[in-house]
Each structure stands twice: as structure tokens, then as C-alpha cells.
Image (cartoon, rainbow, N blue to C red):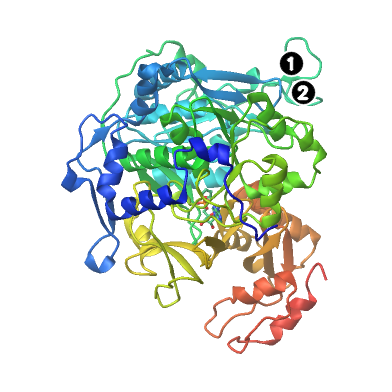
Amino acid sequence: MADRIYYPNAELAKTAYCNSMDQYKKMHEKSIKQPEEFWSEIAKQFYWETTSSNDKFFSYNFNRNEGDIFIKWMEGASTNISFNLLDKNVKCGNGDKIAFYWEGNDVEDYSRLTYRKLLEETCKFANVLKSKGVQKGDRVAIYMPMILELPIAMLACTRIGAVHSVIFAGYSSDSLAERVLDSKAKVLLTADGAWRGSKLLHLKSICDHAMDKVKSHGHNVESCIVISHLRRVTCPPGNTSDGGKTKNGTSNGSTSEVNLSWDDDRDCWWHEEMEDADSSCYPVWVAAEDPLFILYTSGSTGKPKGVLHTTAGYLIYAATTFKYVFDYKPNDVYWCTADIGWITGHTYVVYGPLVNGATSVLFEGTPFYPQNDRYWSVIEKYKVSQFYTAPTAIRSLMKFGDDLVKKYNLDSLKVLGSVGEPINSEAWLWFYNLIGHGKCSIVDTFWQTETGGHVVTPLPGATPMKPGSASFPFFGVLPELLDEDGKIIEGEGEGYLVFRQPWPGMMRSLYGNHERFQTTYFDKFNGFYCTGDGARRDSDGYLWVTGRIDDMLNVSGHLMSTAEVESVLAEHAAVSEAAVVSKPHPVKGQCLYCFITPNEGKNFDKQLQDELKKKIRERIGPFAQPDIIHHAPGLPKTRSGKIMRRILRKIAVGDRNVGDTSTLADEGIVDLLFQLRPEA
Ligand code: WT7
């Protein structure tokens, strides 16, 4: 079943924007050979205050021998993103269309927002930001749960040309502080708290700690605007923590309020600021290459990278990928389960859907609350037609058996999407057969924070699918596979996945560190953007992404670096050295496997292991908690002192075939580490 080819449903293909491989190939070829013509045709659908001239539409340099790396699209053009997403939709008759159905953590909590109302709220909040002194180019940090104020806040930034930096609300206060400090954000937006399943997140208090830390490093967050979220939602049954009171007199749920600490000079309530705010706000026209947002992603050195996306190119790429990859049609309801704190949420919860005038579901909760069938019940409730999620979620839901799924009517589904890591064929087939009833196309979308949007993906009405293959490049994308020496691998083969030329949505720089941008992505292979992933091309030309080939880990779709985890572990007073590798995990894809060398005289015991796990949770975030901590009296190192992670990965999975160990300073260490395997 896994090596079969699955053809797009004929019904779907009939009306699809791209409905055959022939059409795909023609469009792709044009996008590569005549990028200016291809993308300027698409750009005509949007509003430009000033336009770009043909000779300045596209320019770039991918070769460091020829100077600095740069990528520019639509030079000379100016626009406003919120105007294209909101005013334009309202003007062309979509004012009363639902932009978002909001589905809260609790099934009792839901609401909706039309395009007209979204425009109004965006303008009001843009005026609030202005009243706090935010100007074009200023950074606004956002640490929020999945609530309607989050897209409103992002769009309000774009309204006035401010640069948003959304930080996933699962990050610890240290991680938040590091990101706020790096971007020198003037304002921080948050909520008092939020429920995730039956767990309460104290968001404002995490922000307080982060702002203290930022201050001690000499930067001041001038305003912190707080949404009073907890009072309007139902808290989990039996959980009236923090002095909760009953909502509507019902007994199964209650609202809760937490005690917040408050700095009157800095902190204010969102609803109070919004009360008198003007509901119109003239858009600030920004240049095509003006920054739109910063989004931090893990870097292999441990310090997060502020990926910088700009205006015009990102807009047309988000719009085009959303339209073609999900084949969104006017009456569809689309649902992407990703948190807006990740790039998937930026491009495919906020920008892509809204620029296409789509109706989406914005979901605050988890797949497991109140029961493990929440996803299926939400699909039935809103008659979702496109459902976009991650392999790790699929695998974790497969465990609960098929009956939970079969209770629901999922007939509305047309396209299923997967993102975040390679999808194994077992999960693919379950998704295809059980969720999609064998009639939906699966789009396995490969991309990165850096790429801004999908770069290798099937098109649902055109591409014959092979389970586990992301298949072919999207328009404008020209992938190559390179060997270690940078030689291009033609035809079948496996190598480094790189791209030869820019597409409009790719990153432009790392915030405040263009040099790091150049060395990270362009130094390894001159003339190519290097993804850091490996890939294989089969005899039919399909691409199969095999995973990271640098020191990065992908745990449940969260990318992190070994260095980042190691440096936190090594801070513990009892730890002399730490080395972290990934180990395959049935649900998370990969999990963290940590080798710890304790200091002389320090015990390696359960207490130390628990302390280390706690430290990682607190310093990075709960999603980074290690699964295994392995006692390592020594580490396999080369004579020059480099840790051989290749060997550690073998030890982690218990594979005695460790290969050549002759370059090790002490070969005996390998045997010792096998003996100390915690699972053995
Ligand atoms: C890394 C990027 C792009 C949104 C989510 C993650 C891995 C992502 C796939 C896929 C195989 C994938 C890669 C990539 N990845 N999608 N469909 N097949 N691998 O964004 O945090 O920037 O992570 O996720 O390793 O480099 P990110």
C-alpha cells in the first residue's frame, strides 16, 4: 500500500486551480524561466499604492564571491498588507463573510469574526499601538494564546508598518526574554492566562519575569498590553483554581481569574484601551522590501535566529501557495491546527487565508481535550473542507483507535495537509483512508520558517501522491541535490537539499545579523540556499525529504538545536559535560536523548535526572523535555575534541554497528556507554 501511487480524486481535479501535471509543469517552467512575468501577473490581483517597474521587479545575489547576499522583489512598489487582507475583501463584498470561527479550549466557548469586524478591530488596535508611541519600523512582541486578538494584533502592526515578533506562548520566560531583547521590542502584548486542556498557563506572570530579565540587560519594554481572557472562558470541570467563580450558574464549568502583579506605568488592559479607540485608521504605505515580521527559529549554535520576512514578496507567495496547495474555493471552511507562534500559523492561519478571503477555524485547544476526538468533532461542527495538521498529531491520535473517528461525519473534507516533519507511510495511509475516506488529496508540504511558505509540495488536483514524498517544487522554486563536494546530483540519488534561486516568500536576512544569515545559509554551497535537510530523488523525480543533516532536532515538529539544549544542561552545577542527540520516537518523530557526564564526586541519580528535565522545561519550554538521560562517564571524542554524535546516535538506539571508531581518542568509551544504556 505504501509504495502505491494515489491519484487525485477526479471530482476535485475537475474544478481545481491546477488540475493536471501538464498544467503544473507549464506553470512551474514559466515561474522559473520568466519569474518577473509569472509573479507580476499574480501581483495584479492585489492593491499597490505604487507599482514596481519591470526592470526592478526581481533581483538577487546568491553568490558570496560576487558580494553580499540579497533578495529583492517588486522594488519600487508600495502597499499595505492589512489593506489587502481586510479593506479589499470588505470592498469586494466579503464584509459579512466569516474570517474566523473561534473555537475555544472548552467546547462551550466559541465565537466568530467577520471581515468587516476584523477590519474595525484591527484599526482600533492600530490606534492603540499609536497611542503607545509605536511607529513604522518599531518592533512589537506578541506572546498570546490562540485567540482572535492575536491576528488582530498582528494586522494592527501591519496597518502602521510596525514589525511584529510573535513568540510561541509555550516558551519559557527566559526564551521570551532572549527574543524580546534581540528584537528590542517596544511593546509586549499578552493575555492574563489561558487554558490548554486542563492546564492553566500564567502568561502575564511569565511576561513579568521576562520583562524583568530584559530590563536587567538594559532594555525597557515601554508598554505591556494585557487581554483579560480568563474571565470570558470556561475553566475545566473540577478546576476552580485561583478563586474561580461560576459562569451562568452552571456547575460543570467556571471562569477563573488569577492574581496578577501590575506595573501601573507599564501595564494596561486591552479592553480598556480599545474602549475609546477610533475604528478607522489610514493604512501606512510601506515599501515592498520593508520588514513585515520577525519570527525566531532555533539555530545550530544555540542562539535563536530572528528570521526576517518582508512585505510584497511574502504577500504574493503566501497568497499563491494557499490558493493552489489547499485549492481553497469561496464556500470552503479551512482549518490549520498550527499555533500562530510558528511560521505555519503566520502563513497559513493568518496571511494566506485572509488574503484569499477565506473562512478559517482558529482553535485554542488541544486534540485531547475534553476527549481525544476533539479534532474530528471540530471538523464535523464547522464542516471543514481543508484540514492542515502535523504528523506528530496524526500519530498520537492513531493510538486511540478508529472508533473515535468513525463517530463523526467527515464528508466535508477535500484536502488534507501535513507539515513539520517527514510523514511516515503508516500515518499517511491512516490519514488518507480513515480521515479522508480515500477521496481526499494529501498535501505533504515541505517548507521552513525561512522559506516563508511551501516550497516542495503536491498540488491536490494535479499531483499523483506517493505516501511520504513531498513530491515536486512549488512555482518559483528550483531545488537541487548536492553531494558533500557541492556537485549536483542529476536524476536518482540522495544529497543536501538546496535551492538555486529565490522565490518571493523567502527570508531576506536574520534580524540584526546579516553576516550570520550569509554564513548559515549560503556558505556551505556557493550559489545555493542550503536548507539543512537531506533529500532523495526517486526514479520518477519525486523528492523525499529525509530530515535534518545538521545538529538540529525535530521533536513533534518543534525544531531545536543540540547546542541550545546542551548549554542549558551544562549549566547545572553537577554537570561537567552534556551531549544531546535525537532518537526516533513513535509519536514525536524524534525525542531528546541526553548524555550527561557528572562532575567529579557528583552522583548520577534519579534526582539529578529530574532536576535536568525540569531545568529544560523551565529554560526552553515543556516541548523540549528530554525523554532519556544517559549516564556518560566520558564521551566519544576525536583527538581534536569534537564529540562524535554519529556514534551517540547509534548508542541511543542500541545499534552496535557504530562504524569506524579509529579516530576516537578513547575507543573503550563506546563499550562502556553501551553497558550504561538506561533501557538495557
Ligand atoms: C524543518 C523546518 C514549515 C513549518 C513547520 C516547521 C522539517 C517541515 C516537512 C515535511 C519533511 C519537514 C524540515 C525543515 N519539515 N515540513 N513536509 N517533510 N520535513 O518549520 O520550525 O522552520 O522547521 O521542519 O526538517 O527543515 P521550522
The one nearer the camera, 663 or 436, is: 436
Question: Which corner quadrant of the image does residue 2 belong to?
Answer: bottom right
Query: What percent of the width, then of the height, locates residue 476?
Result: 36, 51
Q: CA distance from mark 2 to mark 1?
A: 7 Å
Left or right of 266, for residue 660: right
In the shown orientation, is residue 178 left or right of residue 71? right
Please give the name of the residue rendered at 51% of the width and 61% of the height, measured from the top-left corner.
543
Residue 485 coordinates in the image, percent (x, y) = 41, 78
The tag earlier along the polypeptide, 2 or 1, is 2
Label 1 sits on a secondary structure element that is strand
- Give the side of residue 113 with respect to residue 132, left or right: right
Q: Which mark is residue 240?
A: 2
**Three-letter amino acid code at the position of disc 2:** Thr
Q: Is residue 479 above or below residue 169?
A: below
Q: Is mark 2 within 8 Å of ligand 1?
A: no
Q: Position of residue 667 (x, y in %)?
A: 67, 87
For the point 24% across and 34% down, which residue is it?
78
Give the residue type at disc 1: Lys
Q: Residue furthest bottom?
A: 662
Identify the residue position indicated by label 1 in the image.
245
Please name the residue shown 30% across and 24% down the image: 283
| Residue 452 visible, this angle | yes
Q: Residues within 10 Å of mark 1 (few under 14, many from 20)?
A: some
Q: Residues within 10 Å of mark 2 (few under 14, many from 20)?
A: some
Residue 536 picture location, percent across and down: 53, 67
Answer yes or no: is residue 306 visible: no
**Contact flag, marks 2 and 1 (Cβ < 8 Å):** yes
> Residue shown at 74%/18% (left/top)?
254
